[in-house]
Amino acid sequence: MTLDECFGERKLRRARPDVLKAEKSLEMAEKKLRGAEELAKAGFDDVALITAYASMFHSGRALLFRDGIVEKSHYCLALYLKENYVKTGKIESEVITMMDAFREERHDVLYSLEGIKVKTGETKMAIETARKLLEVVRNLLK
């Protein structure tokens, strides 16, 4: 799916830029990151990974709110970030690539009937990626 298709199918749509929602989404990203760290310390790697991804999602969503974009698709959110922030050099490609990989991992953990086992190393990487993205977005919103 392309970015134009995301807009065409209304998985992304234009709205009025909303700095307040951007700030609230960034606050939620911070809260989710702290939660992921606590869950990882307690040994709940699968839930920690899901929560770390939620932090990444809210960080990315903060930029969309600031840009006047409303999302209805996690995939399209990542695609928007690649097109508008990675290609312009504002966010490192690796960070969004990792975010998108954790989007897929989150989906597998949540919906698999086989009980996906998340390794501690994956959880640590997810938390570190969430931390990096949060910091980049925090700076971009200043």
Image (cartoon, helix red, strand yellow):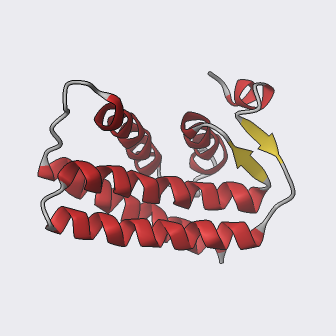
* Residue 61, percent from left and from top: 61, 55
Quadrant in the picture for residue 124: bottom left
Quadrant in the picture for residue 62: bottom right
* Residue 36, percent from left and from top: 30, 63
Q: Is residue 124 above or below residue 96?
A: below
Quadrant containing the N terminus is top right
* Residue 5, percent from left and from top: 72, 24
Tell whether 42 sits left or right of 142: left
Quadrant containing the C terminus is bottom right
Tell whether 114 sits left or right of 84: left
Tell whether 19 sits left or right of 56: right
What residue is shown at x 61% (from left), y 36% (from top)? 76
Q: Nearest the camera: 51 or 65?
A: 51
Q: Nearest the camera: 136 or 69?
A: 69
What residue is shown at x 61% (from left), y 37% (from top)? 73
What residue is shown at x 22% (from left), y 53% (from top)? 123
Taking the view exactly as shown, the residue that stands out farthest to the right is 16
Taking the view exactly as shown, the residue that stands out farthest to the front is 113
Q: Is residue 123 above or below residue 118?
A: below
